[in-house]
Image (tube, rainbow, N blue to C red):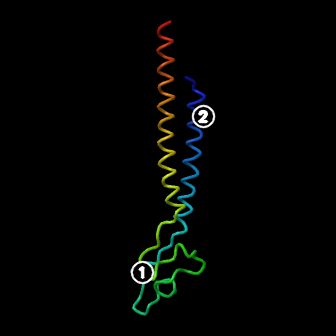
Amino acid sequence: MNFAIGLSGLHAASARLDRAADTIARSSANLNPVSRAAQTTAGVDASGQAAGKAPAGTPASLASRADGSPPAAEPDLVHAMVEQISASRAFMANVNSVQRTKEALDALIDTR
């Protein structure tokens, strides 16, 4: 058992968590749904856009659908969330590895 292996795994899992969090934050920042409550009876929302239309420059994957339903989750966002869960579990496994190594070394020192 070696602390270096466990600590290396902790570092790698931490980097994966950071990348996944960054991807999620960037994806969430790009979501700008049109508020239905802000739409007026004239068919124009509070920003002056035609009701139901995505603001200029919005990627097609984020635009509302023709039936008014919200856009589907982007594959990158879903992948990032799965990656975050996986990295979190890998991090916890490495924490347990370091703890078990410490316990084994403590037991070895106590027996001398």
Reply above or below: 26 against 13. below
Residue 41 percent across, percent down from the top left: 39, 91
Q: Which mark is residue 112?
A: none
**Badge 2 element:** helix
**Badge 1 element:** loop
Whole-angstrom CA distance, mark 1 to mark 2, is 48 Å
Query: Residue drawn 48% across and 19% down?
Result: 104
Reply above or below: 103 against 91. above
Query: Residue drawn 41% across and 77% down?
Result: 69
**The N terminus lies in quadrant:** top right
Query: Residue drawn 57% across and 47% down?
Result: 16
Residue 97 percent across, percent down from the top left: 50, 29
Which residue is identified by label 1? Answer: 68
Residue 50 percent across, percent down from the top left: 50, 88
Q: Which mark is residue 8?
A: 2
Reply above or below: 110 against 25. above
Q: Residue furthest bottom?
A: 42
Tell me which label, 1 or 2, sits earlier in the chain: 2
Reply above or below: 93 against 67. above
Residue type indicated by callout 1: Gly
Q: Residues within 10 Å of mark 1 (few under 14, many from 20)?
A: few
Residue type indicated by callout 2: Ser
Residue 40 percent across, percent down from the top left: 41, 88
State yes or no: discs 1 and 2 in contact (Cβ < 8 Å).
no
